[in-house]
Every structure is written in C-alpha cells, then in structure tokens.
C-alpha cells in the first residue's frame, strides 16, 4: 500500500523595517512516497512573503521550476503541492515500468528506486536570494547519482541573474588558480589534512583533467551570503568517492571575474578572507 505524507511547516521571521533588506518568509512543503521498493522525498522552502511583490512572484516561479511539467494542471506555476505530488508519482511509476521492461529482457532487477530532492533557500541578503535544488536519484546499479542546480534572484528587479554572474576573464591563469585552491580546500576538509597532500592533487583528478588547467564547473556559479559558490558534479573532474567538489570564494577575490550586475549584488554581502569548502549533501 502506498503511504503519502504531506508536511507544511512555516519557517522564518519577517524582519522589522522596510525595503529590499527584508528577509523572505518561507513555508516548507514536503511530499513523500514510502513503499517497499520505492522511496521519494521532495521538500521545498516555498516563499510566502517578501517586501517586493514582483520579486516574490518571480521567486515562487523559480522554486517550481524543477517540478513544472510533471502534469497538465494549468495552474501548475504556483501549485507547489500538486507539482511535488506529480513529480513523485511520475518517478515511482517510471521506476516500476523500468523494472518490468528489464524483466521482459530477462534481466533481473531488484526494483528498488529512490529519489531525494530538496529545493532550499541557501542565501538571503539585502540584494538577492539564492535557491538551490539538490538531491540524489537511484534506479539501479552500483550507486545512484546526485544533482545540483541554483538560481540567484535580484530582490530589486525580480530578475533571475544566475546566467550573468561571471565575465569572460574566467579563462585567465589567475582564475584557474582560484579554482585549484577551491578544490584543494574541499578535498582537505573531506579527506582530512593528514591524509590529503595538496602537492598530490593531480592524483585525485581524472586522467583527462589537469590540476593547473581546471575547467569551469558545468553547474552555474551562485551567490552565497559571503562569496561565490562553485560545484563540480560527480565524475566531472574527480572520482565518485570524492563526491560533489564544491567551494565558496570570497567576494573580494572574485571581483575581477564578476559582471557589474553581479558585483553590485555581491558587494552587499559579508566579507570573508579564505576560500572554504561547501557541503550540501
């Protein structure tokens, strides 16, 4: 028998004062399916109140992005409960169909499938809010795969600016060094300083990846309260065991590589001195 669980929890407090400095009040909406061979857990920090109505409407659309299209509901854009339900049920149905097709081919499959997804507000400053959608999917085999995406929304205009954060200078050797130091910071924290030697960084990378010439991550850069975040996916530059290599670079270090629009938002953030690892799962 299917078990469905709905959870809606109000979180956050509207700060006193007015203007775009007010924090966004959110409500956690969660939908789950728990069956013997299928587990789905989807959770969203849904924005409920903000000072700027245009910004709030755009933000509500953003948090629905990973789930819109799961069904034909004409009001899907803001119907987060229905979107999560449809996303979860479609995954469960697809997982069962996959097992049936494999069995027809004479391939034995356990049938266990898992989908854990979270849409979280990970930054909320005077100038912008950043949301991230991340989680894990398993449909068979040795292991599953994680995923990550992010959206930075300008509080003043309501515009999504995620695709306009970095300028063309990210190909410069100085920026490559920043990426290298970020990877080192992540691996040192994950593995422990005693077991990880930065001089042996190349040993942790795939053969086709060079430590002194790291590519930009495939995932978009994003803004946090105190810096610019980067995430390398599994197998993008390193081995599965190293997970998603992620780190945050202080705004001041990133200033030469940010667009004017991005810097206008970033300079309102907190000051930080060092590149630090970033863990989201």
Image (cartoon, rainbow, N blue to C red):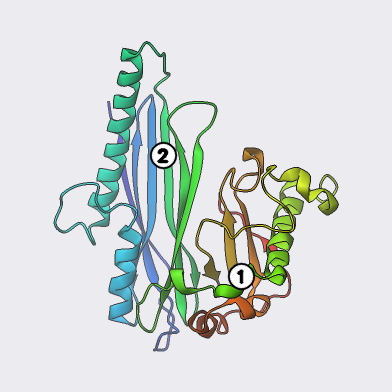
Residue 258 occupies quadrant: bottom right
- Residue linked to disc 1: 170
The percent coordinates of residue 168 (x first, y second) are 56, 74
- Judge by depth and name the residue closer to the eye, 249 or 57: 249
The percent coordinates of residue 175 (x first, y second) are 68, 69
- Judge by depth and name the residue closer to the eye, 225 or 102: 102
Structural distance between the alpha carbons of marks 1 and 2: 34 Å
User: Relative to 165, is 1 above or below?
Assistant: above
Q: Secondary structure at mark 2?
A: strand
Q: Residue furthest bottom?
A: 18
The percent coordinates of residue 190 (x first, y second) are 71, 48
Q: How many marks on residues?
A: 2
In the visual, does 8 lie left or right of 12? left
Residue 124 numbered mark, or none: none
User: Relative to 210, is 141 above or below?
Assistant: above
User: Relative to 56, is 4 above or below?
Assistant: above
Q: State which quarter of the image contains the N terminus.
A: top left
Q: Say few, some or many: other residues with alpha carbon within 10 Å of mark 2 (under 14 / 14 to 19 / 20 or more).
A: many
Residue 115 numbered mark, or none: 2
Q: Are marks 1 and 2 in contact (CB under 8 Å)?
A: no
Q: Earlier in the sequence, mark 1 or mark 2?
A: 2
Do we see residue 13 in this rendering? no
The percent coordinates of residue 59 (x first, y second) are 34, 69
Residue 11 occupies quadrant: bottom left
Taking the spot 35% from the left edge, 28% from the top edge, the residue there is 35
Q: Secondary structure at mark 1?
A: helix
In the visual, does 112 lie left or right of 187? left
């Amino acid at each position: 028998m299917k078990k469905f669980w709905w959870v809606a929890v109000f979180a956050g407090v509207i700060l006193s004062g007015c203007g775009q400095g007010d924090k966004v009040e959110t409500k956690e909406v969660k939908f789950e399916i728990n069956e013997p061979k299928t587990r789905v857990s989807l959770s969203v920090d849904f924005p409920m109140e903000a000072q700027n109505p245009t910004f709030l409407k755009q933000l509500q659309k953003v948090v629905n992005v990973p789930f819109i299209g799961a069904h034909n509901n004409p009001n899907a854009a803001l119907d987060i409960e229905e979107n999560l339900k449809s996303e979860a049920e479609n995954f469960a149905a697809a997982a069962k169909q996959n097992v049936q097709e494999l069995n027809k081919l004479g391939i034995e499959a356990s049938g266990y499938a898992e989908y854990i997804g979270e849409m979280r507000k990970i930054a909320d400053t005077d100038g912008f809010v950043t949301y991230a959608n991340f989680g894990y999917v398993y449909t068979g085999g040795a292991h599953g795969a994680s995923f990550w995406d992010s959206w930075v929304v300008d509080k003043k205009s309501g515009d999504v600016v995620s695709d306009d954060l970095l300028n063309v200078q990210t190909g410069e050797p100085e920026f490559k060094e920043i990426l290298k130091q970020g990877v080192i910071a992540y691996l040192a924290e994950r593995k422990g300083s005693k077991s990880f030697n930065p001089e042996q960084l190349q040993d942790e990378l795939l053969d086709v990846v060079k430590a002194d010439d790291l590519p930009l991550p495939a995932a978009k850069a994003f803004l946090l309260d105190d810096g610019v975040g980067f995430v390398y996916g599994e197998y993008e530059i390193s081995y599965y065991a190293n997970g998603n290599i992620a780190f945050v670079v202080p705004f001041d270090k990133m200033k030469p590589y940010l667009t004017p629009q991005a810097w206008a938002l970033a300079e309102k953030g907190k000051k930080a001195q060092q590149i630090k690892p970033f863990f989201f799962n």
